Image (cartoon, rainbow, N blue to C red):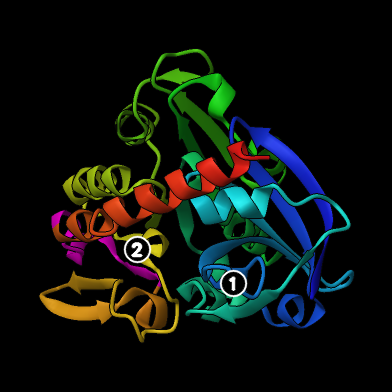
């Protein structure tokens, strides 16, 4: 059993949970994920690690309450326990293997969208702690949906916020902000890392391709079982088939077949809707 030591509401239907999991915290690296199961009858939910603290033995996850399992998870409170919290799983971000000299010579641009902002944070934090250079763009539809802006500002070289409606920061899509930084501010980047909705990552890669800017994306949203056994997270990268959970979750964004990935992401929509209706009906009976 794994204790929830902290719970907070970050934005509408988006929660942060800090879990007591010393063994996971001690081994975790940026880019990896965990499998969470609320109880013995619960669904396995893959969630990217949003932070980890080796000293106090905790791991932070950020969840948006979309389906039945995430609603059940976020209904728990501080002091409650989660049945299973397995990890770290997946491959860490490639930059963790670079020397500090190599890190200092590179300049990264991170593009975070929505809940994808949470897994960007440990990557930028790790680079900050190891002498790396990282600018960050956080995108959201409106100001009320922004998360992790304060935390990110403390570890990024420069933080830029873009909202679709202009309610905070730059008015426009994150792709427009990328162009603004490179074309108008003369910024140079060695690599871009994009994490967020699939459609956002697709258009980020289309934008960065114009500048021949290598781009890494995280396809964690495709995962179901998280072990490679179910095959639900198959993705085409450079014409070859990979499993997101065991071969990723990060891939070369310019090689990913995003149209196929988005079709695969929608495969279980009917089952998810049925489970959600069943969960809501059960809750309304009390």
On screen, 207 above or below 243?
A: above
What separation in Å lies between label 2 and label 1 (alpha carbons)?
A: 22 Å
Is 255 within the magenta?
Answer: yes
Q: Quadrant of the N terminus?
A: bottom right
Residue where numbered disc 1 is placed: 41
Task: Specify whether 113 is left or right of 279.
Answer: left
Image location (x, y in percent) of residue 234: 25, 74
Residue where numbered disc 2 is placed: 222
Q: Is residue 33 visible?
A: yes
Sequence order check, earlier mark of 2 and 1: 1
- The residue sitting at 34% across, 28% down in the picture is 173
Which one is in front, 42 or 129? 42
Describe the element under mark 2 as helix, strand or loop.
helix
The stretch of residues the image draws in magenta is 249-259
Label 1 neighbour load within 10 Å: few <14, some 14-19, many 20+:
few
Q: Is residue 65 visible?
A: no
Q: Quadrant of the C terminus?
A: top right
Image location (x, y in percent) of residue 76: 75, 52
Image location (x, y in percent) of residue 196: 41, 47
Task: Specify whether 135 is left or right of 233.
Answer: right
- The residue sitting at 54% across, 63% down in the picture is 47
Is 263 within the magenta?
Answer: no
């Amino acid at each position: 059993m794994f204790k929830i030591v902290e719970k907070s509401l970050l934005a509408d239907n988006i929660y942060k949970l800090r879990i007591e999991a010393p063994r996971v915290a001690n081994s975790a690296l940026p880019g990896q994920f965990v499998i969470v199961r609320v109880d013995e009858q619960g669904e396995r939910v893959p969630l990217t690690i949003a932070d980890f603290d080796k000293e106090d033995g905790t791991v932070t996850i950020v969840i948006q309450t979309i389906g039945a399992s995430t609603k059940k998870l976020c209904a728990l409170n501080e002091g409650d326990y989660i049945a299973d919290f397995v990890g770290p799983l997946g491959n860490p971000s490639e930059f963790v293997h670079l020397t500090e000299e190599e890190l200092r010579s590179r300049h990264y641009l991170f593009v975070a969208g929505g809940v994808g902002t949470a897994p960007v944070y440990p990557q930028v934090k790790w680079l900050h702690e190891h002498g790396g250079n990282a600018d960050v763009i956080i995108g959201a539809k409106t100001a009320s949906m922004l998360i992790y802006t304060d935390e990110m500002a403390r570890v990024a070289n420069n933080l830029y916020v873009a909202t679709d409606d202009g309610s905070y920061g730059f008015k426009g899509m994150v792709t427009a902000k990328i162009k603004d930084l490179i074309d108008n501010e003369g910024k140079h980047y060695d690599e871009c890392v994009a994490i967020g909705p699939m459609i956002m990552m697709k258009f980020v890669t289309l934008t960065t391709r114009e500048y021949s800017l290598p781009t890494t994306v995280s396809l964690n949203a495709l995962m179901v079982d998280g072990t490679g056994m179910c095959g639900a997270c198959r993705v085409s990268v450079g014409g070859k088939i990979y499993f997101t959970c065991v071969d990723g979750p990060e891939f070369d964004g310019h090689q990913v077949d995003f149209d196929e990935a988005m079709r695969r992401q929608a495969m279980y929509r009917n089952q998810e809707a049925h489970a959600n209706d069943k969960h809501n009906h059960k809750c309304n009976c009390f």
